[in-house]
Amino acid sequence: MTITNKILSLIGFPEPVDLLRFDGENLLPESMLVVAIASKTSDIIDKSIKSLAINVIRDHSLVNEKSISALVFDASHYQSEQSFNDVYLHLSGLLTKLKINSRIVIIATSINNSQTHQEKAFSRSLLGFTKSLAKEVGRKGTTVNILYIDNDINTELDGPLSFLLSSKSTFISGQSLHIATKIKDCKVKKSKKVALVTGAAQGIGAAIAKTLARDGVKVIGLDIEPVQEMLIAAMKNIDGEAISLDISSDEAGEKLVHYLREHQLDGFDLIIHNAGITRDKTFAKMPEHWWSNTLEINLLAVMRINEYLLEHNAINDNGRIVCMSSMNGIAGQVGQTNYATSKAGLIGYVDSLAEEVSNKNITINAIAPGFIETKMTNQIPFITREMGRRMNALSQGGKTQDVAEAVAFFTQDSSYAITGQTLRVCGLNFIGA
Ligand code: NAD
């Protein structure tokens, strides 16, 4: 144990475990216990579970200590007050049977689909349960998340369930996703999708570009002129294309449409608005241009570009838009009024635009990363940095790959049932909702 880790463990931050990340192998857990207290949608959930290559066990008594690496708890039907007791009775004894780096996924009926006061209370109570359990088991690298489903789902659960059980969701814990049936699965799957990734020269953007390329996507990386060489090098590695452009320039949308025409592309299938800046200072001392530049680049440029591309039919049907928000847009941060305003604005924006683009089966979602190990976070003073990276249920910072995997998840065909939502990739940071 390093001296830093010794000091941190003395003040209550345990030594973190090595998180299991997807490296071409170890995608899904080997064995999984499925527990259902009373399910309205058991056939659908069963079908979804069967589609995964996991050894499924349904009888608790067959499970030994530390022998399973995933648990799906189907609580999608509230029957009576007994349902609360069932949560305790079915789950409390199972935690010792989980290996390190396990996945727990709870399935519940969404509040919108719950009818009575009791059902709604039960549905919401499971979120409190999820977050608390996630904080309890996080030091073992285990994650707990909840999927809220609508009553009329069919295959919509497959993609999200598989992702939350996989090693690709290693830094996502204590989070909820709502699975609705508003958007239809596309019938014809495109073999080579075209993605625009902004801020792709370095950091999270470069990781997103690499991950999408791994998944068979043609990536067009965009960044500002001063980092052109870095951008070209990053794109060369993944057989992508580079565009040097400032997203906040008035003609950004027009230049992107021009690029599509010039390269005989019908439109973008995926748009990842990742570019962003910080200009930190307390609000009282903040220069006016720091306020306006941050809002301009992080929020207003994103909205203007989307508007222009949609107006010019430059986002294909069944497209996916992902915006990069931030945990600080949810929790707030001293010295970041400008940044938090812009990142919170993105959350409101995806929520609002989702309805409008749903008629083309386009989804739009946001990701809110917590402490991610990048050049930016490396510059934070040592003690603050160490506290920042440890203040979450998993007791460590995330990697750019963790954010990239979440982006890749949102962009998949099988994520069509998720739109207008914000997913935190933060290891369940102790600050923020
Ligand atoms: P980074 O600074 O390493 O990369 C951001 C990229 O955006 C840079 O390459 C930069 O040149 C580009 N960019 C900035 N302004 C631009 C403009 N006007 N036009 C085009 N490109 C522009 O940052 P990062 O840590 O990789 O962060 C990526 C995104 O994730 C940002 O939106 C950031 O706010 C968000 N985020 C990061 C963290 C973290 O811990 N690193 C946490 C939460 C959110």
Image (cartoon, grey):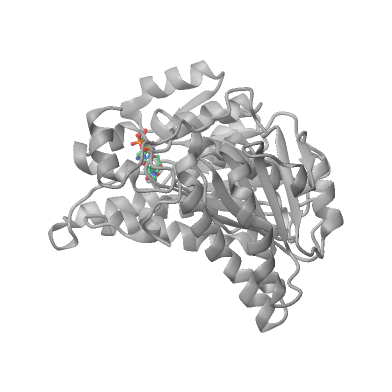
From where the camera sits, is residue 251 visible? yes
Ligand 1 quadrant?
A: top left
Looking at the image, which residue is at 67% across and 38% down?
68
On the picture, is 31 further left or further right than 335? right
On screen, 333 above or below 245?
below
Q: Which quarter of the figure has residue 50?
A: top right
**Camera-nearest residue between 55 and 327:** 55
Which quadrant would the C terminus be assigned to in this image?
bottom left
- Residue 132, how many percent across, how many down? 49, 59
Residue farthest along the left direction in this orientation: 285
Residue 126 image point, x, y percent: 60, 65
Q: Nearer the viewer, residue 50 or 270?
A: 50
Q: On the picture, is 355 further left or further right than 288?
A: right
What residue is at 46 percent from the left and 30 percent from the top?
A: 18
Q: Is residue 314 visible?
A: no
Pinpoint residue 147: horizontal percent, then vertical percent: 65, 56
